[in-house]
Amino acid sequence: MMAKSIFALNRPLNAAETSARRRSLVRLGLAWLAMMQVMMFALPGYLRVEAGPNDSLEVLDWAIFLMNWASLALTVPVVLYAAWPVWQGFGRAWSERRVTMDIPVATSIVAAFIPSAYATITGQGEVYFDSVTMFVAFLLTARYFETRARQSLEASQISTQIDSFCKPLVQQSDRVATVFILTQLGFAFVIAGFWWMTHPEHALSILVALLVMSCPCALALAAPMSLAAMHASLAAYPGMTDAQRQTLLMRTRQVTRQNLYGSLTWHVLTMPLAAVGWVTPWLAALLMFISSAAVVVNAWRLYAIPADPMHMTRNDGPQTEVLS
């Protein structure tokens, strides 16, 4: 009977891994709960317009002031506890002089949180607590999917031939993500510098949006999700013929490249929109999550098998070799 999830192949976890998974779920739950509450607190700020009566504006401004402090109180544990793996990853990358996904993520959180905290304390300026909590929640969700996918790969008993097929896909994904991070970080700071010289009041918002969009979450998911779905199909249907297995591997390579370059294209197309100020920080976080969700859904298509795997013959002509 076919399992109901591409994460069904889970090797037994040791005590440390079990504890790590529980902490991940706690951080994920905290981030989502805080995000929903902070977004509700941010509503008065979005409703404020100068056209209203003065007494109404005074009441609304007082409500915004209180909601900003409440948002700050909820965002602090998200930044310090829920996002703790980000700070650990940033520290490792810094000590090893490597460029990883944690660098743009940590930069994004700092660039959005510190000015927001300062604006709350002084009572002047824009706050981006909703963007911070949304970004962390979506990021942790994508990383949880990635971790589960990698554990699924570790649980599967794959041959040396299939393993040699997987490694180039993972390496290609890592190379593309590294180049994207470096390019996007440079682009973000150049554009923010231009806005700072021309319209400084919009520079921070645009910088935060660009930094949030520089998180290559979908790129990091591209290979692990596709390979996890492939291995789940191989394990769920051990009766596959060689021809069916070759077809599945060919489709896996195709879907992995679709995920990789599709998410890259998505980022490239939305970057100019953020550069001109059309993408707010919270919308950038949502766009990042949408691209990650699209990768998961597309990879899920590999979790399938022909209707009658035990009775198919190999009389359909020569098969394409995909493991070279």
Image (tube, rainbow, N blue to C red):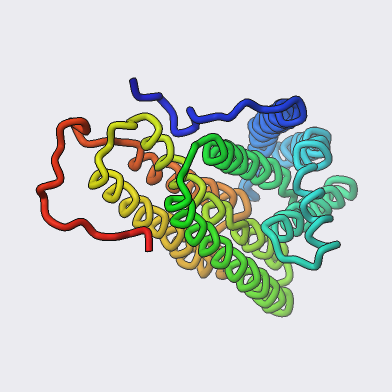
Q: Residue at 30% across / 45% down in the picture?
A: 245
Is residue 261 depicted above or below 192 in this figure? above
Residue 125 in view of the camera: no
In this rendering, would 312 be left or right of 1? left
Q: Quadrant of residue 16?
A: top right
Q: Quadrant of residue 232?
A: top left
Viewer-proximal residue, 7 or 210? 7
Residue placed farthest to the front in the image? 160
Is residue 143 depicted above or below 164 in this figure? above
Q: Quadrant of residue 38?
A: top right
Q: Point out the image quarter for the N terminus.
A: top left
Q: Position of residue 5 (x, y in %)?
A: 44, 29
Is residue 304 depicted above or below 164 in this figure? above
Viewer-proximal residue, 95 or 199? 95
Is residue 277 depicted above or below 158 in this figure? below
Residue 306 in view of the camera: yes
Q: Point out the image quarter for the C terminus.
A: bottom left
Give the mark count: 0
Residue placed farthest to the top in the image? 1
Q: Residue at 62% across / 43% down in the picture?
A: 143
Q: Residue at 48% across / 45% down in the picture?
A: 225
Q: Residue at 59% across / 71% down in the picture?
A: 179
Q: Position of residue 260 (x, y in %)?
A: 46, 59
Q: Position of residue 131 (x, y in %)?
A: 66, 47
Q: Position of residue 315 (x, y in %)?
A: 10, 48
